[in-house]
Image (spheres, rainbow, N blue to C red):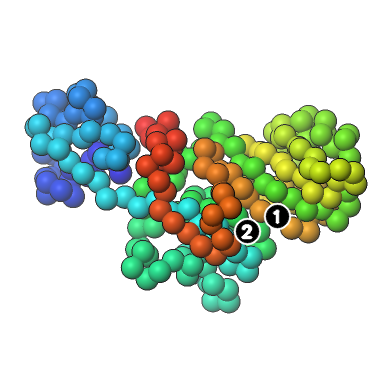
Amino acid sequence: MRLEELIQSTQKVSRKELKRIFAKGLVRVDGQIERNISRNVDSNLHQISLNQRLLTTKERYYILNKPKGVVTANKDAQYPTVFDCLHANDRCNQLKFVGRLDRQTEGLLLLTTNGQLAYDLLQPNQKVSKTYEVWLKEAAEYADIDRFKAGITFLDGTKCQSAQLTLLGTAPFHHVQVTIQEGKFHQVKKMFLSVGKKVEELKRITFGPLVLDDTLAVGQYRRLTIEELQRLKPYFR
């Protein structure tokens, strides 16, 4: 939560009073005077005080193992959305999904009420890595590793950044992993199509420091642990 939102919501102060509070150095984060009213904070990660009184945030962070057939959208007239995967008492209007997975892709999706974090995680300069497990119709080749590393060019001429391709198991390699740091529309599917392979199954297994483990079944979700939230701390600014 941005400091200005936290203070205005808990202290009911005007914008003018808010600026005066910061000008006087009354706001501290982890013991240091904070002048940036837009700084993103969470009381699970930071000690936040106003005139020596501790403030607490109530942000929500969920990791969802998104199933196929579910769309990453706030509402849809035809298909269930990722928010339909949540229990009613865990839903709220402030929840946002961080990035998108298309309807036929399953796997890790972060949902949070922390809009500033959601925005920052998607900025290109953050270079947040995403790893996907991929099942291909046509087998991948060793030469594809170098092609992905050099940067795939889509059939329409769009150039991708360098990506890491890992061949799994033994030849023929129909099962692979790919790690990217971008979020172009249908990027992974288009990358493989550009080297003559069709993606049949796609699953995201990591997003930045978050990892989808075997304990979370398809369609299930849970709150982030404190340890997982700590791993996201570098993206709070």
Vertical order, 138 against 233 (above or below): below
Residue 130 in view? yes
Quarter-of-image position of residue 183: top right
Q: Quadrant of the C terminus?
A: top left
CB under 8 Å between discs 1 and 2: yes
Reading the image, the residue beneath label 2 is 106
Residue drawn at x 16%, y 31% is 27
In the image, residue 43 above or below residue 186: above
Return the residue nearer the eye: 139 or 153: 139
Residue extending farthest to the bottom is: 78
Q: Is residue 85 left or right of residue 188?
A: left
Q: Which label is found at residue 214? A: none
| Residue 196 in the image, given as x and y percentages of width and height | 88, 48
The N terminus is located in which quarter? top left
Q: Is 21 displayed left or right of 45 in the figure?
A: left
Q: Is residue 175 left or right of residue 63?
A: right
Q: Which residue is mark 1?
A: 202
- Name the amino acid, label 2: Glu
